[in-house]
Amino acid sequence: MTAPLILPDDAYNRELVAHVHPPGRVNPTPAGRYQLVVLGGGTAGLVSAMGAAALGAKVALVERHLLGGDCLNTGCVPSKALIAAARAVADARRLGAFGARATVEVDFPAVMERLRRLRAEIAPHDGVERLTGAGVDVFLGDARFVSRDAVEVGGARLMFSRAVIATGARAASLPVPGLAEAAAYTNETIFNLTELPTSLVVIGAGPIGCELAQSFARLGSTVTIVSLDDQVMPREDADAAAVVAVALVEDGVALRLGAKLLRVDRAGGTATVVFERAGVEERVSAAGVLVAVGRAPNVEGLGLDVAGVAVDRAGVVVDDFLRTANPHIFAAGDVCSPLKFTHAADAMARIVIQNALFPGRARVSRLVVPWCTYTEPEVAHVGLTEADARKQGVPCLSLTLPLHDVDRAVLEGDTRGFARLNVHPGTGRVLGATLVGRNAGDMIGPAVLAMTAGISASTLARTIAPYPTQGEIWKRLGDAWQRTRFTARVEAIVRLWLRWMR
């Protein structure tokens, strides 16, 4: 199979391809019946294959494009490199608040070269050599089920006792007239840029849309977000999304929310996005359009019907043990999960290893999966929101502490955001948490641990954090929970006790 050409065709991208789809590599000869055949070399596939091989299983992995999948090549790795560069630019521009001065000039080609260099440096972690060194037979090419227990790739037949479908997802499209002709970017092509678009329309106000809109605005593009949703980041609490919306506008991003897309017109080097809001037709023109409206599962061309695997609009249908309709075939990651995150794919792959190779009964419903949107400020969340709890009939007490009450945030000069802890009012069990602030993704861990281990808010109150750190916010929220237990009756008993002590 011919190795993919990743643009721009420079030394860094050639190094990337050399690791994750080596040119001229010949597939191995199938080694009899495999105990596990993995379709897809993204996070779910890599963890499934490496984990099973480490336990001594005979494993084969098939990848049709680039090992590392979306995360390495077009998702987490390049986007966070771009975000880091944009954040450095924004930090330099606000040095005046700290009594310093700097002149900032953005070299966008250098920004993107750094991105490609770092991606190539990380690539060996997901590369062919690492997999084969761990004992995995790696096949590059298009895989297709030809029976309920066999896959073909490049004319070779791989027989299996168990298989896992981990083919991931791709950028979703929209049936908008003229959009295809506008040569719109997605996350799969935007990181190929070597020149900064002077202007950009981002269609979609979810995590990818907001992250990239803010980054390109900070790097010098004129950016507009156009979205059908009435708020940015519609999955988040409205007040959390509002903090991000203000930050986006401060960085120069124009928001056109509640918009119904009508068409995209292209004239020369300009694309014009035409939409309707409140019954009024509006239009925004830009040098480029980025579509960021979610992900679509990769289920086509796999012969799933032959294998007896059911699919629906959301992807491969699985039960709570990640089994498909064929009990010998499992699925993990974006191809079957509504939580399309790298860390969720990793956790699901670990369930597959337990349940496919052993008499495991690990359930995906028991996972506690946080997520984070890497705007600035970041928004991290885990578990139930107050609205979720209300819909499910779960008693919930919501405790919120603004960052301007946290000393370290004040000293750092960035008090945008808050921390919220949702607890069961009777037991203090942590039901969920939301954190809005710089480095929120790194700070959400204590709340995730509390939910995973069944730790109560009382335990958070007893946990000592170094001072001054933003992490002490969880202790403060634990204290807030403790104060709710200091009822009038408890207060009266305490007063009687203290009087007696005199």
Image: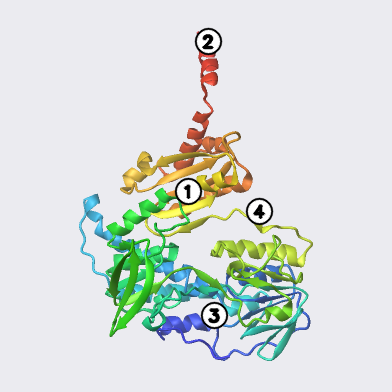
Position in image of residue 136 (x %, y %): 68, 77
Earlier residue among tags 4 and 2: 4
Q: Are marks 3 and 4 in contact (CB under 8 Å)?
A: no
Of the two numbered discs 2 and 1 in the rendering, the one whose residue sits closer to the viewer: 1
C-alpha span from label 2 to label 1:
42 Å
Crowd around label 4: few <14 · some 14–19 · many ≥20 (10 Å)? few
C-alpha span from label 1 to label 4:
20 Å
Residue picked out by circle 3 = 66
Q: Quadrant of the N terminus?
A: bottom right
Of the two numbered discs 3 and 4 in the rendering, the one whose residue sits closer to the viewer: 4
Determine whether, in the image, residue 17 is placed left or right of residue 150: left
C-alpha span from label 4 to label 2:
49 Å
Of the two numbered discs 3 and 2 in the rendering, the one whose residue sits closer to the viewer: 3
Q: Amino acid at mark 4?
A: Arg
Position in image of residue 51 (x %, y %): 67, 67
Q: Amino acid at mark 2?
A: Met
Q: Are marks 1 and 4 in contact (CB under 8 Å)?
A: no
C-alpha span from label 3 to label 4:
31 Å
Residue picked out by circle 2 = 501
Return the residue nearer the eye: 318 or 442.
318
Residue picked out by circle 1 = 434
Position in image of residue 301 (x %, y %): 62, 83
